[in-house]
């Protein structure tokens, strides 16, 4: 590679273990106008991201996994960065805030199982896609007018304790993301959103949402179930709804409450529910539906054998 003449626009290094040569490669690449850079460190070998990385001024796509991210003093960011993907990356929380604020063109941001945050604040005027899977006491959007899809999953069975004064998280979460079309959350995220109570009037941003996915929702917690119902019924343009665990009475309520719903995905974990897809279909035929054209996708799942089959059909 070191004898190559001309630009190298894309560079990927996967299953990497610590190697002195990487610093020679990175020094070489720093002169090659790299636009896309991917570094996956082999699990258990977490190492610092090479310092020459921070000189890549043409960088548009950056993906790092299982490494330490510590820019040098005076780092001015990646001014052309459009896509940032960090997974199992450790850094000081202030570094992320600084990096995002200096990446004015950033459109896609994925943060998965990274450093724990007290407050995760996202300020990115051009952001269209955001995904966060991790731990934080609080998450807020500031000046994010363009996101079309937001995914937020709080890891762990319990939220990180937050002793700050509590006002409703629900309107704060949605207030600065007015263009939202797709929302993907988990049950723990719902627990976070209902802290401080639910507002009497839903945020206006919910009027535009067309797709909602709720994963790992516990039906034991009545407040979480109520918040899910509140969220779903506050989205008049909802067309696509996926919930990865539900009871039939909850399904009955949703079908009766969503007039423009087009698609419902149902995963039937046979070990837990002891009902086949056919039994569920027969039961749903008796349910009243506000949307006459709703289509159902049934997937019957054996916990030991994986996906057995998928059936797409309309319940008449």
Image: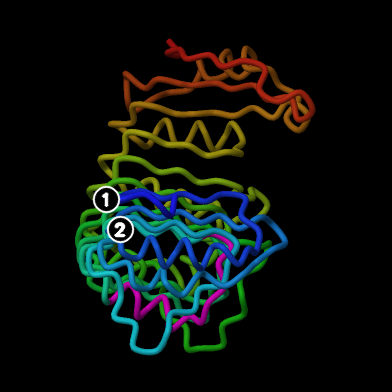
- The residue wearing badge 1 is 6
Determine which of the numbered discs, if any, sits on residue 204 in the image. none
Image point (61%, 36%), residue name: 247
In the drawing, does residue 209 fall left or right of residue 289?
left
Residue that extends furthest to the front in the rendered view of this protein: 3
Q: What sort of colour scheme is used for the picture?
A: rainbow
In the drawing, does residue 263 fall left or right of residue 190?
left
Using a 10 Å C-alpha cutoff, classify the residue at mark 1 as few (fewer than 14 neighbours), some (14 to 19) or many (20 or more): few
**Compared with residue 243, is residue 144 higher up or lower down, i.e. above or below?**
below
**Compared with residue 271, is residue 129 higher up or lower down, i.e. above or below?**
below
**Compared with residue 304, is residue 177 higher up or lower down, i.e. above or below?**
below
Image point (66%, 59%), residue name: 17
Asked if the magenta segment contains residue 229, the reply would be no
Disc 1 + disc 2, Cβ < 8 Å: yes
Callout 2: helix, strand or loop? loop
Question: Residue 135 or 201: which is nearer the viewer?
Answer: 135
Q: Earlier in the sequence, mark 1 or mark 2?
A: 1
Asked if the magenta segment contains residue 94, the reply would be yes
- The residue wearing badge 2 is 32
Q: Position of residue 307 (x, y in %)?
A: 66, 23
The boundaries of the magenta stretch are 87-101
Question: Residue 69 or 170: which is nearer the viewer?
Answer: 69
Callout 1: helix, strand or loop? loop
Q: Position of residue 118 (x, y in %)?
A: 52, 81
In the drawing, does residue 213 fall left or right of residue 218?
left
Q: Mark 1 against mark 2, which lies toward the viewer?
A: 1
Q: Position of residue 116 (x, y in %)?
A: 57, 75
Q: Quadrant of residue 200?
A: bottom left
Q: Position of residue 271 (x, y in %)?
A: 78, 29
Q: If the image is split into quadrants, where does the C terminus sit?
A: top left
């Amino acid at each position: 590679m070191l004898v190559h003449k001309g630009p190298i626009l894309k560079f990927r290094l996967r299953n990497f273990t610590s190697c002195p040569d990487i610093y020679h490669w990175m020094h070489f690449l720093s002169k090659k106008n790299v636009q896309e850079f991917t570094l996956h460190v082999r699990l258990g070998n977490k190492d610092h991201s090479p310092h020459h990385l921070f000189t890549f001024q043409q960088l548009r796509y950056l993906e790092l996994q299982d490494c330490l991210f510590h820019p040098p003093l005076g780092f001015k960011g990646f001014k052309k960065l459009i896509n940032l993907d960090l997974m199992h990356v450790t850094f000081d929380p202030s570094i992320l805030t600084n990096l995002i604020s200096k990446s004015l063109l950033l459109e896609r941001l994925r943060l998965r199982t990274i450093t724990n945050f007290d407050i995760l604040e996202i300020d990115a005027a051009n952001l269209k896609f955001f995904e966060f899977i991790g731990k934080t006491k609080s998450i807020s959007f500031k000046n994010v007018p363009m996101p079309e899809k937001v995914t937020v999953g709080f890891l762990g069975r319990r939220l990180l304790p937050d002793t700050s004064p509590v006002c409703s998280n629900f309107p704060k979460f949605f207030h600065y993301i007015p263009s939202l079309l797709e929302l993907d959350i988990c049950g723990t995220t719902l627990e976070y959103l209902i802290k401080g109570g639910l507002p009497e009037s839903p945020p206006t941003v919910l009027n535009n949402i067309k797709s909602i996915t709720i994963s790992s929702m516990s039906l034991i917690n009545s407040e979480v179930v109520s918040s899910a119902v509140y969220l779903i019924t506050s989205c008049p343009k909802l067309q696509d709804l996926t919930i990865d665990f539900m009871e039939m009475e909850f399904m009955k309520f949703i079908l009766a409450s969503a007039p423009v719903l087009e698609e419902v995905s149902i995963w039937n974990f046979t070990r837990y529910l002891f009902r086949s897809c056919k039994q569920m279909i027969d039961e749903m035929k008796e349910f009243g539906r506000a949307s006459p054209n709703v289509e159902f996708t049934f997937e019957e799942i054996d916990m030991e054998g994986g996906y057995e089959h998928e059936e797409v059909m309309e319940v008449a």
